[in-house]
Amino acid sequence: AQKVTQAQTEISVVEKEDVTLDCVYETRDTTYYLFWYKQPPSGELVFLIRRNSFDEQNEISGRYSWNFQKSTSSFNFTITASQVVDSAVYFCALSATFNTDKLIFGTGTRLQVFP
Amino acid sequence: KAGVTQTPRYLIKTRGQQVTLSCSPISGHRSVSWYQQTPGQGLQFLFEYFSETQRNKGNFPGRFSGRQFSNSRSEMNVSTLELGDSALYLCASSLVGRGTTEAFFGQGTRLTVV
């Protein structure tokens, strides 16, 4: 079975704090892709990152960084020096079937950044 | 480059009616997927189309159907609406639909069934 678990339902931080959003996935496939999406109040899902199962290198993009660890089936997302504009719901997703765009989403983590 | 466009943005329908939602993908994208988002069930995959063929279908009743046209635009239809169909319906498009490229989402159609 394929599953994505985001155990943190809601996180509140004060601006400039660092925050890590956890994502744990389950799949029996050896080839799969992991994604993070941001959903602001406007509703659309904004793509943040895609990682394939063969690339365990951590990635940094500005204030965002991702830690992929196959040994623990985790793909965690850290925002450094959070800002109010980071307030949104963040979704982790798994695409594990060949030749399809079907995504299995976690339940999302609502991040609130207070000034 | 225009993003994924979904119309209408908001819709109110009565139980028992049917509804058609539209999705125009990013120019050049051939794969379109649909998702239903509700507070209780979260984001759930409905179906995926590639080159006018349904390639994958989620676990939804037959009242939910879709199609894709030759210009890659897609529509989804829900017949005999139920209160539980109230949700945000999101459409995503990607270049080749193999999970190897990112999917870009539209702003969604918020359907309310009364």
Image (spheres, coloured by chain):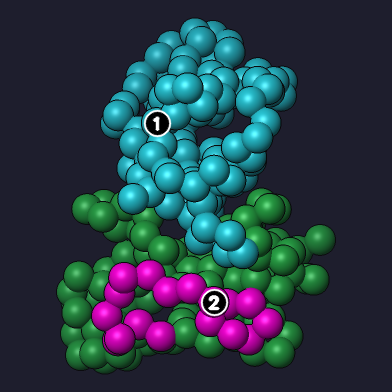
Chain colours: A cyan, B green
Please count the marks in the image: 2
Between B13 and A34, which is closer to the camera in this rendering? A34
Instruction: Please check the rendered image and state whether residue A99 is part of the magenta-colored stretch, yes or no.
Output: no
Q: Determine which of the numbered discs, if any, sits on residue A24 in the image.
A: 1
Query: Residue, x 59% and y 85% (percent of image)?
Result: B53
Percent x, y of residue B42: 32, 52
Q: Magenta residues?
A: B49-65
- The chain letter for the residue carrying disc 2 is B
Between A74 and B63, which is closer to the camera in this rendering? A74
Is label 2 in a helix, a strand or a loop?
A: strand
A34 up-or-down from A102: above or below = above
Query: Residue, x 47% and y 84% (percent of image)?
Result: B66
Farthest residue to the top: give it.
A17
Percent x, y of residue B81: 24, 84
Q: Is residue A44 left or right of residue B114?
A: right
Query: Residue, x 54% and y 77% (percent of image)?
Result: B55
Q: Quadrant of residue B57?
A: bottom left
Between B18 and A76, which is closer to the camera in this rendering? A76
- The chain letter for the residue carrying disc 1 is A
Is label 1 in a helix, a strand or a loop?
A: strand
Which residue is tagged 2? B55
